[in-house]
């Protein structure tokens, strides 16, 4: 046998063989070792031989791919522990109902949409998981976490229907989340179905990266002794097309490096994505195999089903395996969209010897040769090997057929992804193919089918889930609340810095240090930093709380002698992510949803370069919001003119506008330490005591200046979005609360008045502008710190809506209108962000409202130059105020002109957005 096979390989291999006899001898030697000493010994010998050859200068030899067959040979498969017939019947019922959900929703019009083909390709992969592997959370075990392909949701609903968790009415409410009470969300969503869906996966790439970092976070929780996650697995069911996303393939080396053997990815290789083949001209399974193996994963190829076993057993000369490895995915897709005769001619016909070998098989038998992902025995074998594998993450590359069972309605067809209707013929064929006990009439009505409760199928279904701890998916909504520190803990921030000049970033580091020292929540704080600790002056934390590293520290760090050395530690608290914003966001999500997935609230503080936040990973920000993440995101080095030297792609002038669109985000741009402290403390209270599912975005700046002590009574204003810092006409350095300012301004002064709003560092320009206005033009200005235009807007929108709906009731006044109701002249706002940010409140500002902002591309220079360029410095704030007064008729235009001259403003300079 060995000679025959070896000769075939030398004859058929690519390129001419200079010495075929010698090659044959080597191959025979390999065969002999395998036969006598087993494959393990053969691998060892070959490894030595390859090492020797490479040392001798051959260059790299080893290949990362294996032949295009199953990694687990038929003889090594464990026995299937279930009842194969019952499982097939159950699976067929779930298939039917999943299809019926979509078909019924689209009966009247295809407006609602939905996908049939994906679930049909993945049904066996899911059902084997549900019946044998995926463990639910119980009182004494945390359970597995399963990420499903988002657009396979009909299959999950169909199973929940059989389990009695969803009613037929609810299935009929698929994609009608608004008009039908209890309607089912199109895709997994923790806001729309809070007790059901855990992980928002439908935006492709989100499932892969978040599941991977979830597995890592579970190891972190275990290593730090915070939660017992031992033995729990993270399963992610992913698409082969999806693997093209950078968020999917990018992070795989992290899992390999950190030996995440609690992670199992099952990639549904149905060879198709939406438009067409994933790799028509290649083989996606082989490509992924080498990617994953190179990244240190345990790779299980699950290519062929059991019906191929006899043919493979006969394939002693390797001809079949060779042809299998020659056909490309475009071919494989076409085969399954045709018939047995076509497969005979175009697949087996590639080699006349093979054609002969299948001579005895009918076209029907050839057609029934199945793929690995549709064979429950083989799927079981792969899953079993995956859960037992230690020391590496596992990826299962399961070959399936997109639209399996849909026949002419879509099986293997280019259009299958979007097929949402089935013709009557296709429905009848579907019923016959899966032996469903439905009358023609029931089939044509696409009726749901549920066997009687006491039928063997239903008993089996219940028993399987009982054994595995209960139904899945289930989302937990709350965890024990935390005790968070009172505001006084941040005494240093509240007292002001006197003459000392510091930045809000430094202030944040102190806030964080105080929290880390806190007896109650200190150990639950999770600092997440993508390679920017030194930028933010946080390197002191390395030594203090350590950087999480599953391997500890295997080297003597260069700075070991120093107090604040780079300390990696198995129990380290910092997640030092390296340069991956997507990975950092995924850690943020894992930590910020720990309350739900691990019954333990954690307090993430993810600090990063603000420019590399939302605009880099906006979709992950949405995913965080979707799955109700709690925590703090801190945009460091924020502000288009405040980050002065870096310029261009570093200078963030719009993250606040971007975050303002996220429903569960509370975004703040504090100017002073005490504002920051108030916001952080309130965030802790809202998220971890009241357990509101929101997250906070706070911008931090690197400009140093002195911080005043907190004025009395401003906490509420800070949180609602604005409070008064100074009253025009009062002593310049004093800060007053809103109530005291009211009485003053109503006393009536004769000089023109304006109200100036600023946020972040630009508050200081606004204060200086108030001085200029008073000194140079006799104009009195009230100054307000606008900590959050986003929160002001939220309140404004809510009031406006309520008023519209309650026209005869006493009308509510938006907070911003209430603050600015004194009639104290026009309002001017300036921030370090684009005008769109301060514009968020325009609708509710009484009277004239002028906005300055940093629209345009960033650039580098000194701060004063940048603020001049972007026209947000004190001179421009004063100018805008004077112009507004002139427009109101309270000042002559000549006075405005005078200001332009006095402040040396270039009136002919180009608009900063155009240069
Ligand atoms: C980021 C993103 N881009 C595009 C889509 C639209 N989309 C939904 S499913 C799909 C094809 C998915 O193909 P694959 O991952 O192979 O999954 P399959 O349905 O074949 O199992 C596309 C393009 C999306 N959901 N998310
Ligand atoms: Mg696919």
Image: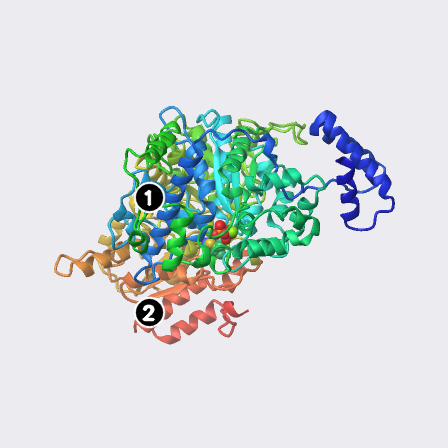
Q: Secondary structure at mark 1?
A: loop
**The C terminus appears in which quarter of the rendering?**
bottom right
Q: Residue at x 49, y 52 (%)?
A: 402
Near-viewer residue (354 or 208) = 354
Q: Secondary structure at mark 2?
A: helix
The residue carrying mark 1 is 711
Give the image location of residue 192, x and y in percent: 32, 47
Near-viewer residue (528 or 118) = 118
Relative to 59, residue 815 above or below = below
Give the image location of residue 616, x and y in percent: 51, 52
Q: Earlier in the sequence, mark 1 or mark 2?
A: 1
Q: Is residue 410 left or right of residue 169?
A: right
Q: Residue at x 86, y 39 (%)?
A: 22
Q: Are marks 1 and 2 in contact (CB under 8 Å)?
A: no
Q: Is residue 793 left or right of residue 305?
A: left
The figure's colour scheme reads: rainbow
Give the image location of residue 110, x and y in percent: 35, 62
Circle 2 Cα neighbour tier, 10 Å, few/some/many (<14 / 14–19 / ≥20): many
* Count of numbered badges drawn on the protein: 2
Q: Residue at x 86, y 41 (%)?
A: 21
Q: Is residue 254 left or right of residue 316?
A: left
User: Residue 695 falls in which quadrant of the image?
Assistant: top left
The residue carrying mark 2 is 885
Residue 224 numbered mark, or none: none
In this rendering, does residue 123 appear at all?
A: yes
Near-viewer residue (350 or 53) = 350
Relative to 488, residue 873 above or below = below
Give the image location of residue 304, x and y in percent: 57, 42
């Amino acid at each position: 046998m060995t000679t025959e096979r070896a000769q075939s390989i030398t004859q058929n291999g690519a390129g001419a063989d200079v010495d075929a006899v010698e090659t044959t001898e080597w191959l025979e030697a390999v065969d002999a070792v395998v036969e006598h000493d087993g494959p393990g010994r053969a691998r060892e010998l070959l490894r030595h031989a390859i090492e020797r050859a490479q040392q001798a200068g051959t260059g790299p030899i080893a290949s990362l791919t294996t032949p295009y067959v199953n990694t687990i040979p038929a003889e090594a498969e464990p026995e299937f522990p279930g009842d194969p017939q019952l499982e097939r019947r159950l699976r067929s019922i779930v298939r039917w109902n999943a299809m019926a959900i979509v078909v019924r929703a689209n009966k009247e019009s295809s407006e609602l949409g939905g996908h049939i083909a994906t679930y049909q390709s993945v049904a066996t992969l899911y059902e084997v998981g549900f019946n044998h592997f995926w463990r639910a959370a119980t009182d004494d075990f945390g359970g597995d976490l399963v990420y499903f392909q988002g657009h396979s949701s009909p299959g999950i609903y169909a199973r929940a229907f059989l389990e009695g968790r969803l009613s037929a009415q609810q299935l009929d409410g698929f994609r009608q989340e608004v008009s039908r009470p209890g309607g089912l969300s199109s895709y997994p969503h923790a806001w729309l179905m809070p007790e059901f869906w855990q992980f928002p996966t439908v935006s492709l790439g989100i499932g892969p990266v978040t599941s991977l970092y979830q597995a890592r976070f579970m190891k972190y929780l275990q290593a730090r002794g915070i939660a017992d996650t031992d033995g729990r697995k993270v399963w992610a069911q992913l698409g082969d097309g999806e693997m093209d996303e950078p968020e999917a393939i990018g992070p795989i080396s992290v899992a390999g490096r950190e030996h995440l053997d609690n992670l199992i990815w099952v990639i549904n290789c149905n060879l198709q994505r939406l438009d067409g083949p994933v790799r028509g001209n290649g083989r996606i399974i082989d490509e992924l195999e080498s990617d994953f193996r190179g990244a240190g994963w345990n790779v299980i190829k699950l290519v062929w089903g059991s019906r191929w076993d006899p043919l493979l057993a006969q394939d002693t000369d390797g001809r079949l395996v060779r042809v299998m490895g020659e056909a490309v995915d475009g071919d494989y897709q076409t085969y399954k969209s045709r018939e047995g005769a076509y497969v005979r001619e175009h697949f087996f016909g590639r080699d006349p010897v093979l054609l002969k070998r299948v001579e005895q098989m009918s076209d029907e038998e050839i057609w029934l040769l199945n793929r690995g992902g549709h064979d429950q025995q083989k799927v079981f074998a792969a899953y079993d090997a995956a859960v037992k594998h230690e020391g590496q993450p596992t990826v299962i590359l399961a070959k399936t057929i997109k639209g399996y069972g849909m026949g002419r309605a879509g099986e293997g067809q280019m259009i299958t992804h979007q097929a949402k209707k089935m013709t009557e013929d296709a429905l009848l064929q579907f019923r016959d193919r899966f032996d469903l006990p439905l009358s023609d009439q029931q089939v044509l009505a696409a009726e749901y089918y549920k066997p009687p409760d006491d039928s063997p199928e239903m008993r089996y279904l219940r028993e399987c889930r009982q054994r595995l701890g209960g139904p899945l998916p289930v989302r937990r909504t709350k965890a024990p609340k935390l005790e968070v520190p009172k505001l006084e803990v941040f005494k240093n921030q509240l007292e002001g810095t006197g003459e000392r000049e510091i930045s809000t970033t430094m202030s944040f580091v102190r806030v964080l240090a105080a929290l880390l020292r806190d007896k109650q929540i200190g150990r639950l704080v999770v600092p997440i930093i993508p390679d920017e600790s030194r930028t933010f002056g946080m390197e002191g934390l390395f030594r203090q709380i350590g950087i999480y590293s599953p391997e500890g520290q295997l080297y003597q760090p260069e700075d070991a002698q120093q107090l604040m050395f780079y300390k990696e530690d198995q129990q380290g608290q910092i997640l030092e992510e390296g340069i991956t914003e997507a990975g950092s966001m995924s850690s943020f999500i894992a930590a910020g949803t720990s309350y739900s997935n691990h019954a333990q609230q954690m307090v993430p503080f993810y600090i990063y370069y603000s420019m590399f936040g939302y605009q880099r990973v906006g979709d992950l920000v949405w995913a965080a919001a979707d799955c109700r993440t709690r925590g703090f995101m801190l945009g460091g080095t924020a502000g288009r003119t405040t980050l002065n030297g870096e310029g261009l792609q570093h200078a963030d002038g719009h993250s606040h506008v971007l975050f303002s669109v996220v429903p569960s985000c509370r975004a703040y741009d504090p100017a002073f330490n005490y504002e920051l402290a108030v916001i952080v403390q309130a965030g802790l209270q809202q998220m971890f005591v009241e357990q509101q599912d929101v997250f906070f975005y706070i911008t931090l700046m690197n400009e140093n200046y002195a911080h005043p002590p907190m004025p009395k009574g401003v906490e509420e204003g800070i949180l609602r979005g604005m409070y008064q810092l100074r009253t025009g006409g009062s002593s310049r350095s004093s800060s007053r609360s809103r109530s005291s300012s009211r009485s003053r301004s109503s006393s009536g002064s004769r000089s023109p008045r304006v109200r100036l709003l600023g946020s972040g560092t630009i508050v200081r320009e606004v204060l200086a502008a108030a001085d200029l206005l008073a000194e140079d033009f006799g104009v009195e200005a009230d100054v307000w710190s606008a900590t959050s235009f986003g929160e002001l807007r939220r309140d404004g929108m809510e009031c406006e809506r309520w008023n519209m709906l309650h026209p005869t009731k006493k009308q509510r006044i938006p907070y911003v209108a209430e603050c600015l109701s004194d009639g104290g002249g026009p309002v001017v706002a300036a921030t370090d962000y684009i005008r769109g940010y301060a514009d968020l409140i325009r609708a509710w500002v009484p009277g004239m409202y002028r906005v300055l902002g940093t629209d345009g591309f960033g650039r580098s220079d000194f701060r004063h130059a940048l603020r001049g360029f972007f026209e947000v410095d004190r001179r421009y704030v004063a100018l805008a105020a004077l112009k507004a007064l002139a427009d109101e008729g309270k000042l002559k235009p000549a006075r405005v002109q005078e200001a332009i001259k006095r402040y040396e403003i270039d009136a002919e300079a180009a608009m900063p957005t155009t240069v």
